[in-house]
Image: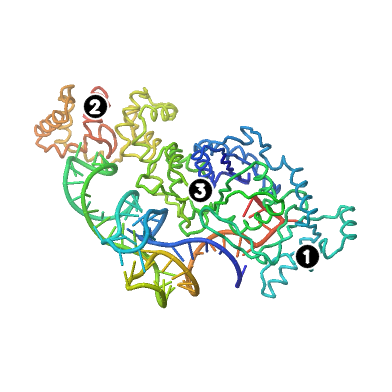
Amino acid sequence: MVRVRFAPSPTGFLHVGSLRTALYNFLFARHHGGVCILRIEDTDRTRLVEGAIEEQISSLAWAGVEFDEGPHVGGNHGPYIQSERFDLYAKHAELLIQNGTAYYAFDTAEELDAMRTRQQQAGIAPKYDRSSMRNQYTLGENETKRLLAEGAPRVVRLHVPLHEEVRFHDEIRGDMVVHGREIDDQILVKSDGFPTYHLANVVDDHLMEITHVIRGEEWLPSTPKHVLLYRAFGWDMPAFAHLPLMLDAQRKKLSKRFGSVMAQDFRDQGYFPAALTNYVALCGWNPGTEQEVFSMAELQQAFTLERVSKSGAIFDYNKLQWMNSQYLVAADPVELATEIKPLLDERGYAYTDLEFVASVVTLLKHRIHFLKDLVEFADYLFSDTLTEVEQGAWQSIAADDALRTALSNINSSLTEECLQTPDAFKAMIAQAAEAAGLKSGKVMKPLRLVITHREVGAELFDTIKLLGIDRTKRRLTEFVA
RNA sequence: GCACCGUUCGUCUAGGGGUUAGGACACCGCCCUUUCAAGGCGGUAACACGGGUUCAAUUCCCGUACGGUGUACCA
């Protein structure tokens, strides 16, 4: 049984990179009929942000990522919040102390800083020096016991074998090998008694029976430490898969400095969750076919780790917008109308009958990027109170006698008959224009402006048909008078 | 600095020892057209570099360059 987890820390809003990691975990689990778990990694007590857990859970739900186990849904492997598993980590650290794969260290922050400065000046890589710092090896058994007994501040560090190679396999990158001398004696338990990510993550993944660890590439360099931990505990390792990073236009890890990066931002801008999810899925993975628009079910069907790419991907807002348009055009107009109706009513628009709104959606969906654009873009359909037209444009029509005559002619010739076919409509316009000494091409733009107060929109024939003869005539009459 | 990872059109990517190196977004042009879109058709544009291996390398190997990540009592 495949069991995967998404393990965010509640230090802020859900990042779109995290969303992708969560999505890939979810898709992988569903593809294999497995279980997707949400685990909150809140072992850094200094960086907690209030409400972050709730926000992340709701953003994930919005995006369509579902969890089978987690703090919000329960499960048999809880608790799913690390701060509620505090005792577990201490117990496990104790195990490592006893079997000699971890040890106590008593160095202060200042002593560690001094050590790093020394190393930097000597031109060597900063790394905990087990043989010269204040730890149970250099202090001896009695002194260590004394310090522990008196409650001196201490941490637990991983005892990394200096002369061994650490090997593991990554599902995306292949076989990895790192020499022990390159691996730091990672702190496992901090002086506040809380575990670091490294310890907590390994203990929890084992206890929660995680089979595949799918996470961002930023974890690749510390994976050897995790491998060593599994070994120290005598546990089987899960499979690892390190995802390529999502990058900004400068090819850096996507960050706040660069436009929208939070799931919430996209939600606020009016992206469909399915469009965002679909785009994000394609950012670092491809199905090997030319299909680009995928329902969630299709993504679950198609997703495999083998087809995840190795290199980082720049987030392309253009393509995301294109994706959103695909969903806008394909969606059921009545559903879209239902979605946008509250916004229209909020505006106090008079014509928000669901069926009518759905017709407006159908008429204009190719001309907008976001559903909510309709609120402004189609105000002349939803309301009889039209926006102000720019003075100059209005004047030039009003001052043109021939045009006024033509529009007046149209006003009197407009009948249900004319709206039977586009040709009938055209014929009527041509006649009305000719009678005023104009070509029909000359009157179309002014006609649109008078009726909609806008220079762009759908075909006039369709627009008037939807507006209705009465409302159209009222606007023409008002202008001519 | 050191370690690790990566490198096909501007972007996301397919491909993989012999291909006209394919698609999508963006861009440009044409068509359609009463506007703006949408749509249709077409176009510009890529294998980082240097050595091997091979009859043949963009594809395999090794270097170099460039980029990224990591190097915390953060995750």
Q: Amino acid at mark 3?
A: Val
Image quadrant occupied by the N terminus of chain A: top right
Mark 2 and mark 1 lie on one chain; the one further toward the N terminus is 1
Nearer the observer, A103 or A437:
A103
Chain holding disc 2: A
Other residues around mark 2 within 10 Å, as few (<14) / some (14–19) / many (≥20): some
Residue shown at 28%/33% (left/top)? Answer: A452
Q: Quadrant of residue A160?
A: bottom right
Image quadrant occupied by the C terminus of chain A: top left
- How far apart marks 2 and 3 lie (CA) works out to 42 Å
Q: Position of residue A110 (x, y in %)?
A: 77, 63
Chain holding disc 3: A
Residue identified by numbered label 1: A111
Nearer the observer, A367 or A190:
A190
Q: Amino acid at mark 2?
A: Lys
> For the residues carrying marks 2 and 1, which lies nearer the camera in this image?
1
Q: Quadrant of residue A375?
A: top left
Residue identified by numbered label 3: A261
Residue shown at 63%/46% (left/top)? Answer: A11
Residue identified by numbered label 2: A465
